[in-house]
Amino acid sequence: MRRILALFVFAILACLILLNYTKTQMQNGKDSLLMRQNQILETSYKAVTQMYKVSIENYFKYVILQKDVLAILHEAKDANEEKKASLRGSLYRLLYPIYSDDFQKIGIRQLHFHTTQGESFLRFHKPSENGDPLFDIRPSIKIANTEKKFVSGFEGGRIYPGFRYVFPIIDKGEHLGSVEISLPYESIESELSKLFTCKNHILLMKKSVATDLVFDNHKDFFMPSSLSDTFVIENPKISKITKKAIDSPFVEKINTLIKKEYPIEKLLLGGNNFSIPIVDGENGYIVNFHPIYDTSHKLAAYTVTYAATDELASMQKSYIIESLVGCFIVFLFSYGIYLYLKQNEKILFEKLQFETIVSTTVNGVLLLNTEGNITFMNLAACNILGYKIGETEGQSSHELIHTHDSSPSNEDCQILKSIKLQSSYMGEEVFKHKNDKKITVLININPFIQNGKSIGSVMIFRDITQEKKNQDMIEHLAYYDSLTELPNRKLLLDRLTTALYNSRRSLEFGGLLFIDLDNFKALNDDKGHDMGDKLLQEVALRLKEQLRACDTVARFGGDEFVVLLTQLGSDEEKAKEELYKIAQKLLLSITEAYHLPKFYYTCTASIGGTLFLDEDTTVDNILKNADTAMYEVKKGGKNEIKIL
C-alpha cells in the first residue's frame, strides 16, 4: 500500500512538475515568437528609415543645393517682407514640379524651408501658412540652425507630425537657414508592409507631439485612440492607414481584448519595445509596439502592427494536449516521456524558427541540389520570379531563371561554379521572370550543410531593379537640366575638358559658342515664367535639331546656352569660317517665330564664339573668351555673331 501510495504521490508530483514544465515551455515559446516578431519589426523599421535617409540626402544634395535655389535663399536672407513674399513665390515655382512629382512618388509629404531665426519661410504643403516661429516647438529646426547639424527623427509640427530630415543650408560659408523633408507614417508603413505580412498598422502619437502643437485649424487632423487616452491617431480623412484600421472588425476586436486583459496604458508610458499575444479560441494574434523617440530623445509615438498567427493558438493547443497525454503516460513511464517531450520541444522549436524566418523574410530563398536543380523556393522568391509554390521544384535553376549573354550552358556562370565547387559567391546577376522580363538581383549563395555534409547550395537574393533605376535617375538629375533635358553646366565642363584633350591629340580645332537670348527678361515680366520656360524648351529643341550627334548643346543657366563643336579641321581660318557658319545657322533657327500658347513670339540672340587647340588654353579661358565675344555683341546692339 505504501508503495502504491508512494507511486501515486510520485505520479501526482511528476504530473504537477510536468504541467508546470509544459506551461513554462509554452510561455518560453510564446516569448521567443514575440521576440522574433518584435525584432523583425524593429529591424525592418530601421532598414526603411535608413533607406529613406539615403534617398532624401541625395535629393537634398542634387535638388535643394542647386544654384537657383541657393540664389533665392541668399537674396531672401536680408530681404524685407514684400521681397520675401516674391522670393517665396519664385522658390515655390522652381521646386514645385519636383515636389509634386518625384517627392510625392516616393511618399514625401512635406518640403519646408526655414529662416536662420527658425521661422517658417515656405511650406510646400501649406504655402499660405508661413512666418511662424518654430524654435520652441521644433527642436530639430533649432539644432539645424544654431548648431548647423543635420537632424533626423520623428517630431510633431504645426500642421502634421512626421519623420523629419532637417538639413542646415550653408553656401560659400554663409548660413541661409534650413530645409526639412518629411515623411508621413503611411510612407514608412508602405515599405514595412513589403518586409513582413502584417495586414494592419496604426501610428499612436502622444498628444504632446500632435494635438498640443498644431495650429488650431488643424486639430481635426487627429482623433482619440481606442487603446489609450494619452495617445491619438491621425484622422481617417487624411490617413488611409487609420481608415483601414478603424474599418477593420479584426483591429477593433483585438483592441478590445488588449484593454480587457493588459495594462496597456502603463505599457505604453514605459516607452519600451513590447509585443502582446492574444489567443481567442482557435485564433492567435500578435500585436507589436515599437516606440519612436523624437529628436529630444523623448517618447513621441508607437508603430503598432496587428498580425494573425496560427502558431500561438496551435502552440497553446499543442502544449495542452501534450500535458494531458504526458500526465497519463507519466504514471507508466515518467522518465521516458520526459525525454520524448524534450526532444519533441527541440524539433518543434527548430521547425518553427526555420519556417518563421523563411516565410517572413522579404528575400527570395532557393535550395539547390549539387546539380543546380531547385528543391525549394520560398514565397518571396515565387513572388519575385512569378511562380507558384512547388511549380519549380526539380527544374534546373540555370535554364529556368539565369540570364546570360551567351547560351545557358555558359561555363563562366559564377552561380554554377559556386555550386560545383561548393564555395560561396555574392554579387549582382540578371534573373528571368516567368514572363521573360529581366530583373536585376543581388545574390548570396553558400553551401547547404546538413548533418555535417554538403547536400547542395542555398541561394538568398533580392530584387534591386528599382534601386538601379533610382540610381540612374539620380545620376541623370546630376548631369542634365530638368527644364530642357539638355546637359547642364557640370556635364558641359566634363565634355569640354575631354574635347580640349582630343583636339590637342588630333591637332584639329574645336569650337565653343556662347548664346544669350535677347530681351528674355521682358518676356518673363510680361507673360510670366511659364512662357519663359516654354521658350527655353523650344530654343533647346531647335538647337539640338541643327547640330551633329557628336556636338553638345547645354543649358548654362537662365537664358544662356553653350554649344560645343569638335573636328573643325586643322586650318584655323577655315575652322573659324565653319564655326561662324554654324553660328549663323543657329541664329537663323532661333529667330524664326515661336508659336507659344495663345500668341506668337519672335526672339533674337547674341552669339559669341571661340576656337581652341593651343596647349596653353584652359577650359576657363575658352569659356571666358566665348563669353567676352557674346558680351561685345550685346554692347554692339545684339542679334549678331562674333568669333574671337
Image: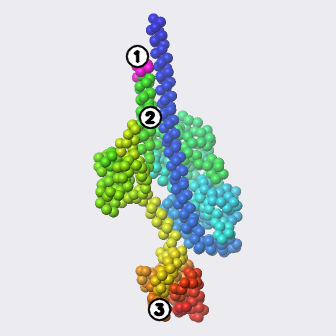
| Mark 1, residue position | 332
Query: Residue at horizontal 43%, vertical 84%?
Result: 547
Q: Is residue 488 visible?
A: no
SS assignment at label 3: loop
Q: CA distance from mark 3 to mark 1?
A: 110 Å
Q: CA distance from mark 2 to mark 3?
A: 84 Å
Other-residue count near label 3 (Cα within 10 Å), few / some / many at <14 / 14–19 / ≥20: few
Query: Residue at horizontal 50%, vertical 36%?
Result: 32
Drawn side of residue 294 relative to residue 202, left or right? right
Give the mark nearest the N terminus, 2 or 3: 2
Q: Give the residue type at disc 1.
A: Leu
Find residue 633 and report its horizontal and vertical position in percent: 57, 91
Query: Residue at horizontal 35%, vertical 56%?
Result: 413
Towards the viewer: 461 or 87: 461
Mark closer to the observer (2, 3)? 3
Which residue is at the far top?
Answer: 1
Towards the viewer: 417 or 143: 417
SS assignment at label 1: helix
Give the mark nearest the N terminus, 3 or 1: 1
Other-residue count near label 1 (Cα within 10 Å), few / some / many at <14 / 14–19 / ≥20: few
Image: magenta residue range: 324-336
Find residue 263 and report its horizontal and vertical position in percent: 58, 36
Q: Which mark is residue 349?
A: 2
Q: CA distance from mark 1 to mark 2?
A: 27 Å
Q: Is residue 206 visible?
A: yes
| Mark 3, residue position | 571
Q: The N terminus is located in which quarter?
A: top left
Find residue 37 and report its horizontal and vertical position in percent: 49, 42
Find residue 230 and report its horizontal and vertical position in percent: 62, 44
Does the stretch in magenta take in 231? no
Q: Give the residue type at disc 3.
A: Asp
SS assignment at label 2: helix
